[in-house]
Amino acid sequence: MATEQKNAGTGFWGRILHVNLTEGSFEYEDLEREFYANYLSGVGLGAKVLWDRLKPGVDPLGPENILGFTTGILTDTPSLFTGRFTVVGKSPLSGGWGDSNCGGYFAPFLKRCQVDAVFFYGASEKPVYLYMDGKEVRIEDAGEIWGKDIVETEDYLKEKYGKRVQVASIGQSGENLCRFAGICNDGGRIAARSGLGAVMGSKNLKAVVAAGKKRVGAVEKETMKNLTKEFRERFGNLRFLEKVLDDKGLALTGWITRVLPVYPRQPSFLWRTILRKYGTPGLTSMSAESGDSPIKNWGGAGCSDFPLSTVKAIGPDAVIQFQQKKYGCFSCPLQCGGIMKVDKGPHQLAETHKPEYETICAFGGMALNNDVYSIYKLNDMCNRAGIDTISCGAVCAFAVECFENGILTEKDTGGIKLAWGDGEALIRLTELIINREGIGDILAEGVKVASAQIQKGSDQYAVHCGGVEPPMHDPRVDVGYGMAYYCDPTPGRHTVCSNMYLDLQELEKQFPSAEKPAQFFTDKEKYRTDNKAKGIAIDTYFKMLVDCSGLCMFGTQTGGEMPLVKWLNAATGFDFTPDEYLAIGERVHQLRHAFNVREGINEAKNPPHGRTWGSPPLEKGPYKGLTLDMEALGKNYYSEMGWNWETGKPLPARMKGLGLETVTEALK
């Protein structure tokens, strides 16, 4: 039975739930206010709990792994863009730290159960799900829903417990231990990266049902409301720009950024307008034209292999033709999502989520596929099965290239003739991956492991970063991505930091230690390696702060000067300066990295696949002949973070300044 918490009304409950699935038991743990002053909540809470409780060297898919669902410290307070939860655990893809972030409506309902997080230990002998509502916690039999997709699972549980409960669940891919399976809510919002859906499946945990009703409150509730009102007014709208913005204009913008010798700072108002009108599919044509989108399994160039005349068939106007209504996550004024009805073509869908840019590119340009109907079908299949579309699309492109070069044959694929541009073949291949049948059983391991099993020189086509398939953004368009793909504890992650994010977030207006980026820069400046690390480091600490708060990254990039620090102080009663909050972000980031070092992983010694940084260089397109100096980028990043290049270990003095002396001792 839950009890009233002494920290109620401070943005956090001061309590987390530990569930032992092996024993079928649970217990609450109370956390002191000092804990939140050091780690806030969200990913910070998750990093600290896993550091303290998870033994190094355990099998990510074994019962010793720990899986955590954490809510942000601003979630369900009078703030905006704060409806996200973070899942944490040891990643079955990288073998190191794993976290994944998701929107929707699950986060506030989990927090209304009067806990800031729930952690799962061990593994059940049979399929189960967890029900919690703030008054009771129950571990229930999931036999009737094991094998169902996530939409069917949500429908079943909402029919049983009421439409207002929220459900986070795995589909068939998580049950089948696909290493890039994710965890879903709201019928298509997915915590996709790091393969934590497979961890959930390994524990025989089908779902978490959150039915809480009690809101956490804030110390200065009225102050928060006033800050939110002011922010919403500054955020404003640009309806006139939405009316004139179209696919042609976006493609022209991409072309201009490709050919200009001087680049302007990215304007946040344009990004806000794109998201409001199209959502992330608004990037499709623009990114293909600029060179941002990887093409043909990272071996081609958009302007030649996948030109605008081809890509427009899956561009933003083509995608939103099926949109029935806009969709926004909890506390979101932007509504970049969409609920669609595909009533044309060979794969009609009565209701489905709008595919994101990452999905469209992964199953589009990566495989030279411009069949919008197949992409809608693939998106729906992956959402229902609970699978990361980035990794799945990358695995499919890898298989196509292996087939093209005779490494895989029809005998291997069960008669499927894989070819560039064949959307129907991608659908059949994805079905095999979801069900782990035939070649799909190998591909469900991810490209790194699959290539090691296939061999025959397939490693030259197995594009990954530390075992994780990279997202749909080329580091040659933004070397900040290169630093993240290479050096972040969750390798191949595009949402952590980039130079473009520094433009959009305007951190110099909020944090004294942040420098204002140049208004214009040239190609020579763009590829410098000696002046990027400080900005990227601050951007990384800020992203950790964002994930500790339960914030959506888009909210920080679309203008309006988000009052994040003021929100945090008003919610918690803390009186921290902006740079003191950045220090919390660094503390969390250092702990994530230390987790990997303890596991024997030093990101510096495991660079991304050469295709992501131009080794060998492309023979055509905007990055023809260009090879990034990844070692220089990595060394500058490590120096800025205070990490030893050879061992990965953080400098003791740096850790002492963050109050992490015990981490230094543990890594000796």
Image: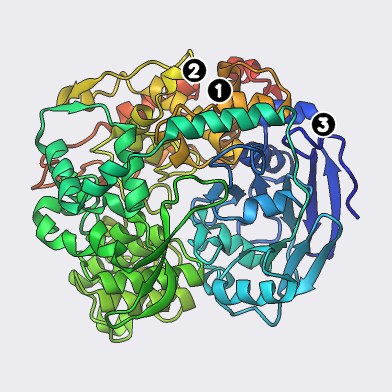
Residue at (28% x, 39% y) in the render: 475
* Residue picked out by circle 3: 32
Residue at (47% x, 67% y) in the render: 383
Residue 644 placement (x, y as % from top left): 48, 24
Marks 1 and 3, the one that precedes in the sequence: 3
* Residue picked out by circle 2: 511
Marks 2 and 1, the one that precedes in the sequence: 2
Q: Residue 141 occupies which quadrant of the picture?
A: bottom right
Marks 2 and 3, the one that precedes in the sequence: 3
Q: Residue 124 occupies which quadrant of the picture?
A: bottom right
Residue at (84% x, 57% y) in the render: 26
Residue 640 placement (x, y as % from top left): 44, 20
**Amino acid at pointer 3:** Glu
Q: Is residue 438 above or below residue 593?
A: below
**Amino acid at pointer 1:** Leu
Q: How far, Cα to Cα, is label 1 from label 3? A: 21 Å
Q: Nearer the viewer, mark 2 or mark 1?
A: 2
- Label 2 with label 1: CB-CB less than 8 Å: yes
The secondary element bearing badge 3 is classed as loop
